[in-house]
C-alpha cells in the first residue's frame, strides 16, 4: 500500500535580482527531479513579485507518510541546490514529521 501527499512550501526571497527568472530555473530543476524521482509528481511554482514570495507545490508518494514526506522534501531541496540556493536552515526529517504530526493532531475536522 502507498501513501500520497500534496506538499506546499512558501519561501521569502530577499535578494533575487530577477525573481521570475529564478523561479523559472527552479521549475526546470523541479521538473528534472520529477523525471528521475519515483513518486514525485505534479510540480508547480508560483511567484508573488510584490511580496518577494516563491511558492512550490508537488505531490509525493511513498510506502507510508514518513517516506512520502521524505520524497517531497529531498526532491525540492535537491532542486534548490541545483539552482544555487543554499538550505542551511532546512528542517531535518524528524523536525518536519514533528511539525506535520502536530498540525494533523490539532486540525479541526469540519
Image (spheres, rainbow, N blue to C red):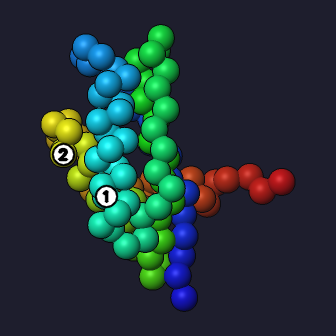
Disc 1 versus disc 2: distance between alpha carbons?
Answer: 10 Å
Disc 1 vs disc 2: Cβ atoms closer than 8 Å? no
Per the image, the residue denoted by label 2 is 82
Residue found at the very far top of the displayed protein:
50
Asked which quadrant contains residue 86, the reply is top left
Quadrant where the image shows the C terminus:
bottom right
Residue 33: give its label: 1
Q: Is residue 77 visible?
A: no
Which of these two is toward me, 2 or 26? Answer: 26
The answer to whether residue 101 is above or below residue 88 is below
Quarter holding residue 16: top left
For residue 74, side relative to residue 56 (left or right): left
> Which residue appears at 36% of the width and 52% of the height?
31
The disc, 1 or 2, on the residue closer to the chain's N-terminal end is 1
Q: Residue at x 54, y 63 (%)?
A: 5
Q: Within 10 angstroms of label 2, few (less than 14), some, or many (20 or more) residues?
A: some
Q: How far across and how far down the image is residue 7, in percent?
A: 50, 53
Which residue is painted at 54% across and 76% down in the image?
3
| Quadrant into which the N terminus falls | bottom right
Residue beneath the point at 30% across and 16% down: 18
Question: The residue tagged with tag 2: helix, strand or loop?
Answer: helix
Q: Is residue 7 above or below residue 66?
A: above
Element marked by disc 1? helix
Q: Nearer the viewer, residue 88 or 106?
A: 88
- Residue 32 seen anywhere in this rendered image of the structure: yes
**Residue 103 placement (x, y as % from top left):** 56, 53
Mark 1 neighbour class, 10 Å CA radius: few under 14, some 14 to 19, many 20 or more: many
| Vertical position of residue 25 compared to residue 94: above or below | above
Amino acid at each position: 500500500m502507498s501513501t500520497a501527499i500534496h506538499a506546499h512550501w512558501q519561501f521569502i526571497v530577499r535578494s533575487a535580482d530577477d525573481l521570475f527568472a529564478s523561479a523559472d530555473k527552479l521549475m526546470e530543476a523541479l521538473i528534472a527531479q520529477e523525471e528521475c524521482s519515483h513518486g514525485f509528481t505534479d510540480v508547480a511554482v508560483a511567484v508573488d513579485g510584490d511580496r518577494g514570495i516563491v511558492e512550490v507545490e508537488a505531490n509525493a508518494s511513498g510506502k507510508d507518510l514518513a517516506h512520502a514526506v521524505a520524497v517531497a522534501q529531498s526532491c525540492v531541496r535537491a532542486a534548490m541546490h541545483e539552482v544555487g540556493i543554499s538550505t542551511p536552515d532546512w528542517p531535518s526529517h524528524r523536525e518536519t514529521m514533528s511539525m506535520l504530526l502536530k498540525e494533523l493532531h490539532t486540525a479541526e475536522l469540519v
